[in-house]
Amino acid sequence: MNWNADLNRREFLWTIGSLSAMAAMGGVNFLFSGDNRVAAAGKGARVSVGWLNRDETSNVLFKSMIEKATDFSWLKKGDKVLVKLALNSGNPNPSTSDPWSLDCLLKILNERGAKTYVGDQSGVRNVYWTAAGQQRGSSRAFCKATGMLDIIEANGATPVFFEERGYDSYIKTSPAGAHHWKNPLQVTSFVNEVDHIIYLTRLGSHGFADITSGMKIGVGFLREDSRRELHQGGDNFYAMYEEINEVPEIKSKLRLSVSAGRKVMSLIGPDAGYILEPYGAPIFASENLMAHEIFAYAFLQYCREYMTPKDATNEAIGSGTLWEIQKNRTARNRGFLKYVWNLSEDQVPPIPVWQPGDIYKHPAIANYIKLNQQENTQFAVTEINENPDSIARGYLQRQLKV
């Protein structure tokens, strides 16, 4: 494909109605109990999407997609930009961020004169550093295993792994306004050392949250004790992980969320599950976290319904179909907390099972919409080129309620 020629003549725009109109049609439930809403200025809710054929890459398409998502008016030469990875483990994409996308993104930031940092703190099952000095696992080693550390260094960026800064290098903070956290969050102090944050997410399923995309990636900012509180959140689990993005030190600096769906883990996750490679693979970005999330969720649902067999299994998971295990969240969360913190079952409230359906009603997405007063937000999907999978286009439009 001649990308340079093709991108100059193709662009498709889906204009999606306001969320309040969707609520009137039964698409979104905005009835929340008691909490005062937090006023927040909504960003332009536009998702920019490019489509790749299977096994295809294009730096030209990636750059065009990013530049349609943001005009970079927020970035000055010399500004410090943290690219926040999804690095729960050392397993390759789609368990973690896409290395090719990281390379493209860093090249774009370098062209614009940014001083770039890239990093994360892996999940506590794999990286567990405590106040008592216990250390298990290394985010740096996992980043190396995925191939992303070499890309970071080749592009002249600085790798940052939050646990290496020490257990006391975290700051206490809380989401603005009403929220579901009982205690202040312990967030890496590195967020105060940069001017801007970009999320480079994975597009895939999560065993507890159902989806891992932009809203859950903030867990990597937390110290292990705040992660424990999150996993003990019970009914509030979904809202709590979304509210990490609402703390002022992160919210005021989050500029862009970026994803690639060249490989998708459609069930279980994040470290193991059913993996597929879509015929038409999206690369997409948005300045609006909610807009990015719902597009990611719509495509994940497409992968589940059209490309994931109902008897899907995976040797890494064990017996039973992955569809059955996907619903068993409380038992798996209790096993997780028993392993990491030696907590008993009565110390771990049940996590409600969110059964995928109307993506606007996912508890994390609904919580974001409420807190940011985005019920009346209108947003749009701009396709840089045509999706080679014609079935996917109609499905996505139905999911997004175009």
Image: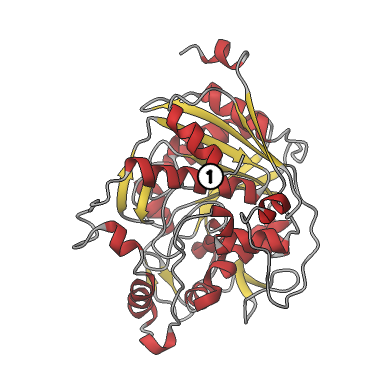
The colour mode here is secondary structure
Q: Nearer the viewer, residue 144 or 28?
A: 28
How many callouts does the rendering have? 1
Name the residue carrying label 1. 399
Residue positioned 37% across, 45% down in the render: 305
Residue positioned 44% across, 47% down in the render: 301
- Residue 221 position, x and y percent, is 56, 62
- Residue 199 visible in the current orientation: no
Q: Is residue 1 above or below residue 34?
A: above
- Residue 13 position, x and y percent, is 65, 28
- Residue 162 visible in the current orientation: yes
Quarter holding the N terminus is top left
Residue positioned 70% across, 57% down in the render: 251
Residue density around tag 1, few if under 14, some if 14–19, many if 20 or more, within 10 Å: some
Determine the residue located farthest toward the front in the rendered image. 25
SS assignment at label 1: helix
Q: Is residue 76 above or below residue 289?
A: above
- Residue 36 position, x and y percent, is 77, 73
Quarter holding the C terminus is top right
- Residue 171 position, x and y percent, is 65, 71
Mark 1 is on which residue type?
Gln
Q: Is residue 275 above or below residue 164?
A: above
Q: Nearer the viewer, residue 235 or 220?
A: 235
Q: Nearer the viewer, residue 24 or 269?
A: 24
Is 167 positioned to the left or the right of 124 in the image? Answer: right
Is 14 positioned to the left or the right of 206 in the image? Answer: right
Q: Is residue 184 above or below residue 363?
A: below
Residue 243 location, quadrant: bottom right
